[in-house]
Image: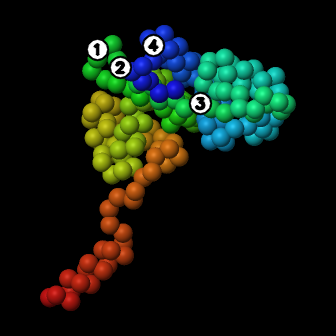
Amino acid sequence: MSRTSNRTNGDIVRDFLSVAGLLEDPQLAHLYTYLDHEGEATVQDVIDDLELAQGTAYTYVNRLVEAGVVEITHEEQPRRYAAREIDLTVTAAAGDREYTITPALIDAVGRRETNSDIDTYIDRHGIAGLATALTYAVAREQGETTHRLMAQDLDISPLAAEIILQALRPVVHDYYEIEEAGASLEAISVDDHDATDDA
């Protein structure tokens, strides 16, 4: 569902409204994330793996299909469903910030019901704030920033920054390839040994 230059404005608005529905409902976001990770699944898989009631599972899957973020991949019974790729960039009204809505952000929203730190952060800073925090979480895991710099940039307490960065860490590692930053203990030991040999 990438936004490209040949798409009509109507398509882009429809995509945005579909994704906005996911961001407003953590249960739908969680189901979308499940289907995105599984590749494809049946409603029975959803019932078994997510422990949803049968009626709820069918309702949620149908809502995602109607929204256009999930597609039917196998028409015969049992039907199989798969998540469609989402990559939508939204520019703030002032034009000074852009937010990219990706499966990682949808996953973070889906964790709202089971992670009180994410829930509290969304209550205080909204989905746009969570998107910004996710950007900082990626940068932190790559060794490019710290919780103190995030706190200073966003005018929040260092404790609040650390809490949300820790809460988003599993999401970052699920969606981004993070290389270990810094030298290992072995490398430091070898360097120290070499230094004593030179002396």
What residue sits right under mark 4 in the picture?
Answer: 8
Mark 2: amino acid: Thr
Identify the coloring: rainbow
Which residue, given by chain and number where applicable, does mark 1 sit on?
Answer: 94
User: Residue shown at 27%/84% (left/top)?
Assistant: 193
Left-right relation of 165 to 106: left
Residue with the most extreme right position: 77
SS at badge 1: loop
Are the residues flagged by discs 1 and 3 in contact, CB closer than 8 Å? no
When asked about the image quadrant of residue 106, the answer is top right
Circle 3 packing at 10 Å, graded few (<14), some (14-19), many (20+), is some
Sequence-wise, the earlier of marks 4 and 3 is 4
Q: Is the Cβ of the residue at disc 1 closer than 8 Å to that at disc 2?
A: no
- The three-letter amino acid code for the residue at tag 4 is Thr
Work out whether mark 1 precedes mark 4 in sequence or the reverse, and give the earlier one.
Answer: 4
Residue named by callout 2? 91
